[in-house]
Amino acid sequence: MNLQIAAITLSIFVLTAAAELPKAPSLLPPDTRYKADLLLIVAHPDDDVVIGGYLARASLDEHKRIAVIYCTTGDGGGNSVGFEAGRSLGEMRIIEARRALQSIGIENVWFLDGHDTPGQDVLWSLDNWTHGRALDKIVRLVRLTRPDVIATWLPDYVVGENHDDHQGAGVLATEAFDTAGDPTRFPEQVAPPRNRQGMMNMTEGLHPWQPKKLYYFTDAFEVFGPYWHDRQELSPFRKNIVDGAGPAYSQTDISPSRKISYAKLTADYQTFYLTQEGYLGTDAIKKNDFRYFEYPTHFIFGKSVVGGSVAGDIFENVRPGDACPFAPVPGYRAAKQDEVTFSLGEPWAFYREFWKAHDIEHISNLLPVPEAAVRFGNTLHIPLTIRNATAGATDVTLTSHLPAGWADKTRFAVYPVRAGEVYPVQAEIAAPAAGKRGWHELTFDAEAAGRRVGTVSLRVYLSNSGALPQ
Ligand SMILES: [Zn+2]
């Protein structure tokens, strides 16, 4: 081969190679079957009944895509119709939930592996669920479902059912709202797989996702419905916490698709949860009396990264298809302190910092004075915290101011607190053995070196009811 032929051959080869350079396929978009407009994050199968009318409205009549996460299977609950309990009950409640949700067109439903924690202290639930593990799972599902709106239980200690698991779901949902858009959190979820069609991919190929709006609902006694509706349980000290705090949805409106009221739809919905007081629904249908389902559904505005009004529709300002940039929150900031302070302890102390850290500090205005409930003759456990941020040790003396009939059974009155220490105190207050149910205010003063260093007040509802350990 002479040089000329060699040059021609080479140029033909180069031209052919350029024409055949392999081109990669377009990226695969996220799987649209899992896209949600609204993601509901709750604790137990049947928590959804509380906003069942709204779910029916949003799914059936507004054609919103809804997905649901249950943090537990409800394996600590009671059974209204059978002898099955514990984990067996949990397995049944999974099916009850799937059938209930399916009846209003909701199919994307996940159950986490947290166990039901009957109590009122959110920190018990977070501990029992292994907090970080539960957050990992919820953030994954937020990234998979890419919701515009997240709805969940109110992260606060209220007088009502006040289930710690409800509060735990609210804490985790708030954390997930603020985490899923951050690629440095659970980065293994957003790293691409090495070979999606191969086996043993240890990274997950999701994308960071910033939800747009966050709404809460509450199990406080003042939100009436089929479970409770007793005016005598309302606090005389303050206004109803849900008034003006967010949107409310009528239950007496008629569903255009089903031609019955959302109250009736909620009663129907509740009948799927036979183990969970499903009789409230069946009885209402039998008697054709839906009055206890007709109280409006209330939401409490949490926050929005797309603006909108507090009481406006949940989807106000949401433009479907828009992706929002990550909206970081302040996170915990230690306050500068140089004195002795006295305050209510956990879980209230946690919430004070949690709301600030997650940019939802307005939640602290709902109950400006903390509240709790106790039964006649029972002991109220009140966690108190003494913090000594001075350079020297000090003795702090606590004094309680209680209404007639209440008794302070706390073992000690004077606490030695060294420089830099935080002393946790458990006050034990015996409630009156009997009397008229109602609200009382309890106050505690702390004194150091003859000077008042703080006062803590707690408003307490005293009655014959209240099922969960305080
Ligand atoms: Zn529940």
Image (cartoon, rainbow, N blue to C red):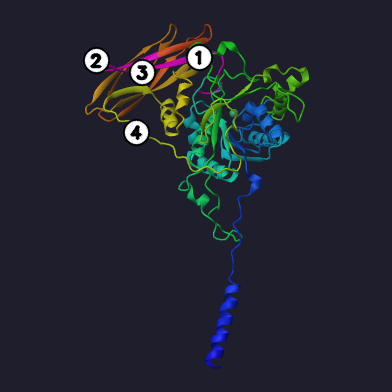
Ligand 1 in which quarter: top right
Q: Is residue 407 depicted above or below 315 in this figure?
A: above
* Quarter-of-image position of residue 105: top right
Q: Residue furthest bottom?
A: 2
Q: Residues under labels 1 and 3: Cα distance?
A: 24 Å
The secondary structure type at the circle numbered 4 is loop
Mark 1, residue position: 461
The magenta region covers 443-470
In the rendered structure, the answer to whether residue 306 lies left or right of residue 57 reads: left
- Residue closest to the eye, 378 or 438: 438
Q: Which residue shows up at 63% across the image and 35% down it?
A: 90
Mark 4, residue position: 334
First of labels 1, 3 by sequence position: 3
> Identity of the amino acid at label 1?
Tyr
Residue 196, image x, y percentages? 59, 58
First of labels 3, 2 by sequence position: 3
Mark 2, residue position: 450
> Identity of the amino acid at label 4?
Ala
> Identity of the amino acid at label 2?
Gly
Whether residue 402 can be seen here: yes
Mark 3, residue position: 411
Badge 2: residue crowd in 10 Å (few <14, some 14–19, many ≥20): few
